Amino acid sequence: MHNVLISLILITFLSSCSWLREPVKEIKVVKEPIERVPLNLPDPDPLKLTPTNWIIITKENAVQIFEELEEKGIDPVLFGITDEGYKQLSMDFLEIRQYLQYQKFIIGKYREYYEPKKEDKNDN
């Protein structure tokens, strides 16, 4: 008798009171394409750089250059780099230009994806 009672309790727990639950509702899946939202990103403003006045100082013209600067009321201060340093500076600017071009390319591709031309919409 004890075994029968335990069996009945186990069967009740295993069935999880299935006679009390409502039947599972069927889920309907609807697939509709979602239209992409335009990015509405303005083009970045072009860089407005201030031109730099380079003065080349050598052993022969150093005194003359410093005198000219003093006559113009400019503090004669020297910031110098070697020819190798100048080459490296030029390479760094090249890398910056390439990076900016790559970013511009990426933004263009995002625009192509999110803001398709009117003709593309009619083709689909």
Image (tube, rainbow, N blue to C red):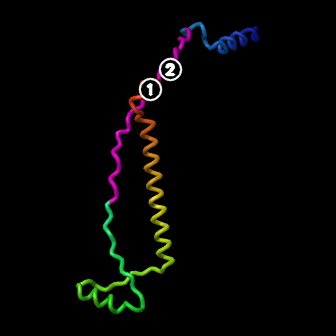
Among the 4 quarters of the image, the one containing residue 68: bottom left
Quadrant of the rendering where the N terminus is positioned = top right
The answer to whether 19 appears left or right of 104 in the picture is right
Q: CA distance from mark 1 to mark 2?
A: 9 Å
Residue at 40% across / 92% down in the picture? Answer: 60
Residue under pointer 2 = 31
Residue at 50% across / 72% down in the picture? Answer: 88
Residue 58 location (% of width, % of height): 41, 88
Q: Which amino acid is tagged 1?
A: Ile
Q: Does dot 2 land on a helix, a strand or a loop? A: loop
Dominant SS of magenta comes to loop
Q: Which mark is residue 84?
A: none
Check disc 1: other Cα within 10 Å, few if <14, some if 14-19, many if 20+. Answer: few
Q: How many marks?
A: 2
Residue at 32% across / 69% down in the picture? Answer: 51
Residue at 50% across / 17% down in the picture? Answer: 30
10 to 106, vertically: above or below: above
The answer to whether 109 appears left or right of 17 in the picture is left
Q: Is residue 26 magenta?
A: yes
Residue 89 location (% of width, % of height): 46, 71
Check disc 2: other Cα within 10 Å, few if <14, some if 14-19, many if 20+. Answer: few
Q: Which residues are magenta?
A: 23-47
Q: Does dot 1 land on a helix, a strand or a loop? A: loop
Q: Nearer the viewer, residue 18 or 85?
A: 85
Residues marked 1 and 2 touching at CB (< 8 Å): no
Residue 2 location (% of width, % of height): 75, 11
Q: Is residue 124 magenta?
A: no
Among the 4 quarters of the image, the one containing residue 113: top left
Residue under pointer 1 = 34
Q: Which amino acid is tagged 2?
A: Lys
Q: Nearer the viewer, residue 10 or 106?
A: 106
111 to 4, vertically: above or below: below
